[in-house]
Every structure is written in C-alpha cells, then in structure tokens.
Image (tube, coloured by chain):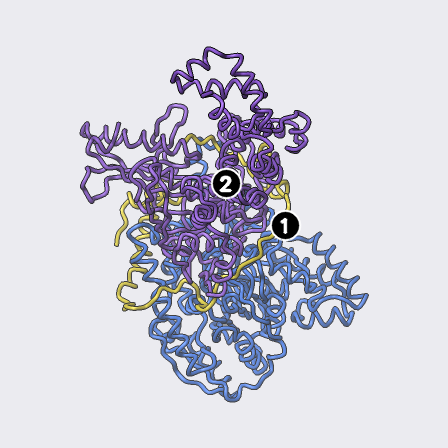
Amino acid sequence: MNATASGWETVIGLEIHAQLATRSKIFSGAATAYGAPPNAQASLVDLGYPGVLPVLNREAVRMAVRFGLAIGARIARQSVFARKNYFYPDLPKGYQISQYELPIVAQGALDVVLDDGSIKRVGITRAHLEEDAGKSLHEGLGAFTGVDLNRAGTPLIEIVSEPDMRSAKEAVAYMKKVHTLVRYLEICDGNMQEGSFRCDANVSVRPKGSDRLGTRAEIKNINSFRYVEKAIQYEVARQIELIESGGKVVQETRLYDPDKGETRSMRTKEEANDYRYFPDPDLLPLALDEAFIEEVRAGLPELPDEKAARFSSQYGLSAYDAGVLTASRELADYYEEVVRAVPREPKLAANWVMGELAAALNKENLEVGSGRMPAARLASLLARIADQTISGKIAKEVFEAMWAGGESADVIIESKGLKQITDTGAIERAIEEVMAKNPGQLADYRAGKDKLFGFFVGQVMKATQGKANPAQLNELLRKKLPG
Amino acid sequence: MALTRAQIESIAQLARLELEPAEIPVYQESLSRIIDLVGELDRADTAGVTPMAHPLPGLRQRLRADEVTEQDRHELYQANAPQVAAGLYLVPKVIE
Amino acid sequence: MVHRNSLTELAAGLRAKTFSSVELVRAFLQRIEAAQPVLNAFISITAEQALAAAAAADRELAAGRGGPLAGVPIAHKDLFCTAGVRTTCGSRMLDNFVSPYDATVVAKLKAAGAINLGKLNMDEFAMGSSNETSWFGPVRNPWNTDFVPGGSSGGSAAAVAARLIPAATATDTGGSIRQPAALCGITGIKPTYGRVSRYGMIAFASSLDQGGVLTTSAADAALMLREMAGFDANDSTSVDAPVPDYVAELDAPLAGVRIGLIKEFVDEGLDRENELRIRDALKVLERLGASLREVSLPNLPRSVPVYYVVAPAECSSNLARYDGVRFGHRCQEPRDLQDLYRRSRGEGFGAEVKRRVMTGTYVLSAGYYDAYYLKAQRVRQLIAADFKRAFGEVDVLVGPTSPTAAFRLGAKTADPITMYLNDIYTIGANLAGLPALSVPCGFVGDLPVGLQVVGPHFAEGRILNVAHRYQRETDWHRRSPERFA
C-alpha cells in the first residue's frame, strides 16, 4: 500500500546500536573478540559477581567522541552513567549501565543522499555509551535456555535519530549512511551478521498534514538493510489497516519475522517497563576537557561526505559515482591508489572499479581489501588501455585471465597475443578483405543503409580477433566503405 | 501514607520477590511506616539545591587503558553456578 | 594470655620472637572455638589455612622479613570476598558461595602479613543495627549475652571485645562499625569515602559503604587502617591520594584543637546516662587542651529519612544480581524463569533485606523518583553543607555514637523504625562521606558507651589523634568482659 497516496504520513525514527571496536570491554579488561567459546570472555565484572566494580575504558570514550564530532554534535563536557534496572538472564547485574539524562553526545545531524539524488538532513537527538548484554540461546538445550555472557560488557554506542524519516527507503538510506560512517571512523566493524550493528525502528503513522505524532510501535533488533525496509513497510501497512478498521495502535515492542515477512508483538521481557533509572553510584561523572576533544578531532579521518566532494572536484566524477566509490574507506583508498598509478585516467579507473572489479568481487563474496586484485595490478591493466596497447573490450578478457591466474596484464597480453592492431595498413587490408567477402551488404550500405556500418565493424573485429583499434577502425571504415 | 496490597504486590513483582500471602499485610504495614518516615523530607526547603550523587563532589571518572587483562577462567567462575552445560549458564527455557 | 596484647604489641612480639605466629593462631583459635557457642561471632573458621599461613609467616619472620602485620591474627567481616573461602554476607542467598577472588582489603592485609582466622557474622547484607538478621543466627554481646552487640558488624565487634582476635575488618554504611564499637566497648573507625577500596566488598549502598576496622585502641586502628587504605584502580570511587602514616600522627598534643559538640545530637532521644558519659569524656578532652564549643547542624536530624531513601534505592539495584542464575541460592524445580527469580530471591533473602529492596524499588519507581530519591539527595547536599560549615569553625565534631547502650535481643525487632533510629547519630558521616570513629568512654550499668569523633574529609589522622590522646588519659578501652578476660 502506498501510504502517501492513501492520505497517511509515515514517521520513522531509528535507534542504532553499534558495538565499539575496542580490544577490551567498556567496564572490564575482558576481550571483546567475536566467536570465543561460551563464557570464556566473561570476567567477574562482566558476570556481575558480588563485590565487583566497573572502570571505564578510555578508547570507548574516544570512539564516542569521534562519532559525535563526525555528526557535528555537541560533546557533553560532563556526562553521567545511569543504571537501567530490569531482570533478564543475559543481564547479569540485573541492570544495564547506560546513560540517561546526560549523554556524552547531544544533537547532531547527518545528510543522507536519497535514491532520487536529493539530500535529506536527518537529525540525531543523542548518542550515548552503554554496555551490551549477553546472549540467550533457546535452541538445542531441551527445557532450558543457555546464557553466554561473552558479549556482556561490550561497549555500545546507541545512536538515536529524530523521527525525521518519512519512508522505509529514507530509513534505509540513513541506516546505510550511519553504517558507512562508523566504519570510516574505525569505531565499529559494521558486521551485522555478528551483531555489531543493530537497528530498532520506531514506526508510527498519522493523517497527512497532522503535526501530532501517532502512537508508535518499536520493531527491535533488525540486522540487515533489506529487513529494515521490509519490516517498516509491513508495519506501516499493518498500522494503517488497523486504524482504518477502527482499531488503535498499541505502543509495544515487535519483532520482525523474515520468514513470514511480518512483525509480531513480542512476549515482553520487560512487562512493567519501569527501568527506575538513577545515576550509577559506582561511576563518577565523566568530564572531558578541551585538550581531549581536540586530540580526538585532530585524529578524525576525511569523512565520507568530504571525500565524495573531493572526488567529484579532484577526479571529475559525478556525485553518484563519487558516492559509490566513497561508500567505504577501503574502496575509496583502493580507488585512489589506482588513480595514483594512472593519474590521467580517473574516469576510466572509476568505471573499472565500480564495474568489472566490483562484479568479480561480489561473485566470490570478497571485499576490496581482500588482496585478490591489488590496486597496482589493476592499474597496470588500465595503463595498457590508456596507451592503446589493448582496447577496452580486450581488456575485459585480460582482466578475467588476471583474476583467475593472478598474472600481470603484460604477461597475459603477450602470451595470448592480444595486442591491439594499430597499424593502418593492416587494418585497411582487413577492411578490404571484409568488403570483398560481403558485396551485398556493401552495396546496401552504399545505397543508404547506414545501419550496416555496425555489421562491417563487427566483421573486421571478427577477422582481427577483436584486436583492431576501434577508433582507427571507425575512421578507416568511414573512408573506405563509401568507395 | 498507607500502601495498598496491590502496590506491595506490584513492587514485589518489579523486585522479583515471592511473598507468602500472609506476609503481604506485614510488609504493607512496615513499608507504609517507612514511607511515612521518609515523607518528612517533604518539609525540607531544597529550592535550588543540586542532588548529591557522590559524597566527594569534585571527583571525576578515571579512564583505563584499552587492554585485555583477563583470561578465560570460566571453570573457576562456574564452580558456583547452580546449573551449567557446555559452558552455558542454564535457566528454564525462555520463550520470546 | 597472649590475647591480652593489643595488635601493636602482638606485631612487635612476633618480630621480637617472644612468640610465634603458629602459637598465636593456635591460642586464638582455641578461644574462638570456645566462644563460638556463646557468642556466635563467626560464620566460618579457617583453622587449617590459618595455621599454614602462620607457619609461612614464621619462616618469613625468622629470615628477618615480613610486613608490618607479619604473623598477626585477624578476621574479616563476611562481606569481604576471600578467595577459596566461603563468603556469605550473613545470608542464605550466599550460603554456598565460595569467592574466586580476594577483596582488595583482604589482599592488602595479606600482603602486610596478617593471618586470617575466619569470616565474621553480620546482619544480612549489612542491613541492621543489632546483628539479629543474620541467616546464621544472632551474635551476642560479650558484656551480657542477653544483649545485642550492635550491627551490622556485630560479629567483628563481639570477637574483638571478647579478645578472640586483636582486630577485625568491618564495613560501615550508616554506622555499622561505630555503633557496634560503642555497644561492645571497643574502638572502630570508618574512613573517608574513597579512602579504602570497595573492590570485593560486597555492595549494600554504593555511595555510603566504606571498609574500616574494629579493634581495641586508636593506635591499633591506625596501624590497620594504614595497611588497608590506598588507591585501587579496580574501584572507580577510590581516591588517588597518598596514605599518611596514621601511627606517626597519633601523639600530637591536643592543645589548640577546636572541638564541636553537635547540638542536635543532645536531644530527647539520647539516654540521660549516656549523655553523662559523653560529657565526662568531653571534660577529659578539655583538660588535654582542646577547646570545646557547641555547633549546630540544623539539617542533621533529617539524616535518617535521607538514609532510608538512598540506601534502599542503591541496595535494591545492587542486590538485583542475586537471581539464582550464576551463583548463590536457587530454588528447587523452578517452573519457569519468573518463578526462578521470585522464589530464589524470596527464599534467599530475609525479611529486612526484602523490606529494604522493596522500599528502594518503590522510591525509584516512575512517579516517585523526584519526590523521594532526588529530594533525599538534595537534603543530603544540605547535610553535607552543614558539616562543611561546621568544619570552618572547629577541627573535629564530637557526640554520642548511639542513643542508648546495648539492648536486649528481640527488644527492637517488632518495628523496623525503632531499629533504624539506632543509627541516628552515625548516618550523617556516611551521607557526607566523612571519617568517623567511636571510642569507649564509660559504662551504663555493665554496658559500654561510645564517644563519636567526626572529622573533615581525609582527616583520619586527626580523629585518631584525638582518640589516642583520650585513650592515653583513660582506660575504658583496656576493659574487657570478665567472662572473656
């Protein structure tokens, strides 16, 4: 159902939890590495043992400040940790240490490029530090649930957006932007399968033109861009249908079921949602001075928007292409390494990185940083296109061979004899042969069937195993065909 | 201020405390008296006074270096656990 | 008769080879075993480990090594985690809990050479003023075993008063060191908040709890505190400041020291006989050259209501970890998760603990947080300001520790409020984080009375000095119950 067409407006806010890529936990010295055997990385502090106390990880603070600066937010010079009290097996202390009234980051924004190229500014209300809970495993243990506290105490930054998004697509675009940003900043690896980047969506609808917010439902723990989009779309439709048939939206927590493609009300783990927040007496107020903040600011990398703008102006790329190439720091760095080797061919490099290379990587589920096709090696191939040794078309063949066998462009061109034919005489001879073999088409062409030009191009290419220089071929055909 | 039975039950549930039905009136009485006692604070003039979260006001949170200092000691730590299997703490199955 | 020696004398005697640590430990263990059915001061007695540690200490001493407390027997309140040893907090909830680690205080005293003889009885989770809420049964006052020793560190106080050990660690959240010291006729000190590490000290109310010591004199307290105090990186609320040598500061003369008697503490609640003992003690201090005046701390009478909002609030959260999942008591055959929580906690916690957890849950709950919790923390600020102002006029504050001497077992258990009012004079120092101690200053009948001395932040040396000079002039602190002489 098209919400807008039916007179309804969708209002969406996202809460994103990103695990910070510190070595140790936010309040203890246990490791945070993914995949350890159950409870091997749960220290006494993480287990909430009697008598233990939390001590704050400096790097987690630095990473939160990095994020705040990158979204142009105000960094709180004093922030406070608060306890969020509730009972659940994966919450060992019976409370989560979080931040409530005074978060470390307040009021920022991100500019998001939408599908139609327009830019939407999404406000970010706040971002705060908190600790992650452990994991409950409900399958395979019979009448029991098993609790693994390795994840308990991993630092999280919770990023709360304003309810500024008006469609599922806008929400996904924002989520992707945050995802790119946290990886750029090297504060989060963004691995959604491993749970390092999670999203809750607050969704409500209201009649178009209304400025009051409708009752919202919270869809929790969605771990892919696709699911976010589908979950929101389903939820919007559900709410509209509910209201139009006389019902009322209940403020509740819902889960998205990807197999059924629907959201379901959660049997709540926090029935009485009274978290009884109060400042954690085991932690003192966090004070950040100007020196600390400036040090973090000085260490900020070039941010995605800045880099994309620079790519556009420096390399003459379209905004779209610049956006694609700066989607990740690895990709952007790779592209620039290629261009450094073939500095006069930024557009050629862009086409190849976004085209052939991307396709080959995707097919084998590889990242650009995997080393499968080092930048220097791709650049050497592009150099041979640039210097006319081979045509663009032949280059694709060479690329395939390079990808499969790992040899250099030159070796493959040589061994397969793929050098472009640029000798005018040779091309003319090939043209004359083709003209002689195809008198009928020649006559038709000369009679006015211009379309047959392509036929002759094809035939000469075939005769020369694709090696005729296309530009020269074109020029010579135009001279010779008319007769 | 007298707390009702329903309030006691609701507080006990928030705190996950099983109370015998016969105990509830007892807690009702004692908690009501305690709330009366602390209700005296109403009369204090605290306009413009900040709440004191920590007794030593000027102190600020210390930061520790991001280093792994803990090893896998789960066998020792789980010696106290009521029920463990394959390194996991077990509780009655939770359905979400 | 080694038990008649003070901690300081025992430490010196060990170094002088007057006796060995093994001899001492044997002697004290014998006294402990004999007294146990009468006083019930101990929950666990670690005889084997103590003798092994004593033998090791003797080897160190023979080689001319060993820390300041090498070979000296002590014991720990059962709220301090002791590695490999049962740590119960006086509760059924932790009846079977063996701690995998040492509290920082325990480790420091071990490093100083002290020998731990066992874990001392206490009010459950440190909640109480009479040691009647322990799962392991009440502790009795060695001066009269029909009477309470005070609480929550009742076991620590009774054991020291009966000379079963020369010193015991303890904790004080609303008076739990000072009040038992007063009721048992011994010396007890609660240091400045943040002076002693809380790591491994099982939490009751985090912004109020402090670890301290019960012993028979200010000199002994100075020695113990010097070894216990200090910055701990594992405790974010631990203060990074050097620890003075409290022993070296003990003998400074009191001439010119300004002493303030807290006006609001001499009220109708103070037993008349107790008041007379206090006034006698103050005369001694004046004879020693101190000047005495009255100071008013008008917000101080609100200490008890403030405390009974803040402490329960913090404890309701601190005790949420006791859920039957990773350690501690678990109910039999839980039907489901909620049943597991409710029955494990319902069975594991006693009535007073449940009362305070529920009070705390209530005052933090939606709609009540501002009216109760924030309000209490604001009044707390006013109380702290009163103290600060007073310390602008005087160097130390004095007054009674407890409104009455010890009372009979069962006398105050019917009404929690009556019990809570025992702490009326001690709570203020916890709210403001100030160092405070109690020294014996006389008797009412055959029951001891305590004098409280409170100082500004980090003035442990000063208040110990005042106490020590008082003890040089008097001998109340040398008295011990005849039965345990």
Locate residue A182, reporting x and y percent.
47, 46
Q: Is residue C147 visible?
A: no
Residue on which disc 2 sits: A134
Residue at 57% across / 81% down in the picture? Answer: C469
Chain A in the picture: what colour?
Answer: purple
Q: Which chain is blue?
A: C
**In the picture provided, is C304 more to the left or to the right than B90?**
left
Most foreground residue, C194 or C329: C194
Q: How many marks?
A: 2
Q: Few, some or many C-alpha atoms within 10 Å of disc 2 (few <14, some 14-19, many ≥20)?
A: many
Q: Is residue C215 visible?
A: yes
Locate residue C28, reporting x and y percent.
68, 61
Q: Are marks 1 and 2 on the same chain?
A: no
Figure quadrant of the N terminus of chain A: top left
* Badge 2 element: loop
Vertical comparison of A481 with A263: above or below: above
Q: Which chain is yellow?
A: B
At label 1, the amino acid type is Val
